[in-house]
Image (tube, grey):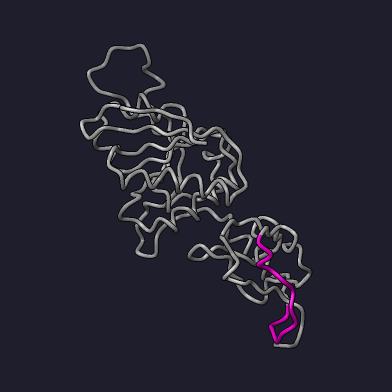
Amino acid sequence: MKKTRKIIEIDEGKCTGCGLCINSCAEGALKLVNGKAKLVGDIYCDGLGACLGNCPEGALRIIEREAEDFREEAVKELEAKKHAPLNTLPCGCPSASAIALKPKGAACQGEPSAEQASELTHWPIKLQLLNPAMPFLKDTDLVLLADCCAASMPDLHRKILRGGSVAMGCPKLDDIEVHIARLADILRTARPKSLTVVHMEVPCCFGFVQAALTAAQRAGASMSMRRVKIARTGEIIEEAAIA
């Protein structure tokens, strides 16, 4: 049922997509869509304006308009969905089922082996399949990995992945804005200790570095950040802090 009441309004022309308003909205009424803050639905906004003072651009204001009533039970349902574990995709594929793995490399460090042991600590590994609430992401050393690096670097597990968690994608062919939004959710929720961006030497791959900076800004996250550049022949050719 609709009635005239107070509700948030967002000026998209002023919104820079920093995400600060989203962090301050306890009801989860706001989210980033294509780099702009959007109202998820009238029923999630209580109209009290807790988000107003957190917008550096003044893009938010409270207005009165016809809107559906605020529903607290809808807010609780939305919160439950955010933190529900991922099970399967609609097609029935179990690739999103979250499980913790025991790195094989941890059991055979110092032991001679002709086969390189896996250092993978969890599944899934694709960024868009990772649930920010999964325990293996909390307080970890997170690696944002451009997927070509996995095929190019033969010693990736030992030199890069050991002891941490990984989120994998393509900064050129994937929707980078979608990646930024998911990474921001992970940084905001899991609060990893550090973030390492591993990218190829080709210029388009450097986009993951900027994506990481943008995600950290939107999440209001502060952590150690660095980048590792991989040559097409598989060697590490540069390591540097990300400021």
* Stretch in magenta: 57-69
68 part of magenta stretch: yes
Which image quarter: residue 6?
bottom right
Count of numbered labels shown in the rendering: 0
Residue 187 picture location, percent across and down: 56, 45
Query: In the image, what residue occupies the spot 70% across and 73% down?
Result: 8
Left or right of 231 in this view: 78: right
194 part of magenta stretch: no
240 is higher (above) or lower (below) than 217: above
Residue 115 picture location, percent across and down: 24, 22
Query: In the image, what residue occupies the spot 45% across and 46% down?
Result: 210
Residue 138 picture location, percent across and down: 57, 39
Considering the whole magenta stretch, tell me its main secondary structure.
Answer: strand
Residue 154 picture location, percent across and down: 25, 28
Toward the viewer: 202 or 96? 202
133 is higher (above) or lower (below) than 155: below
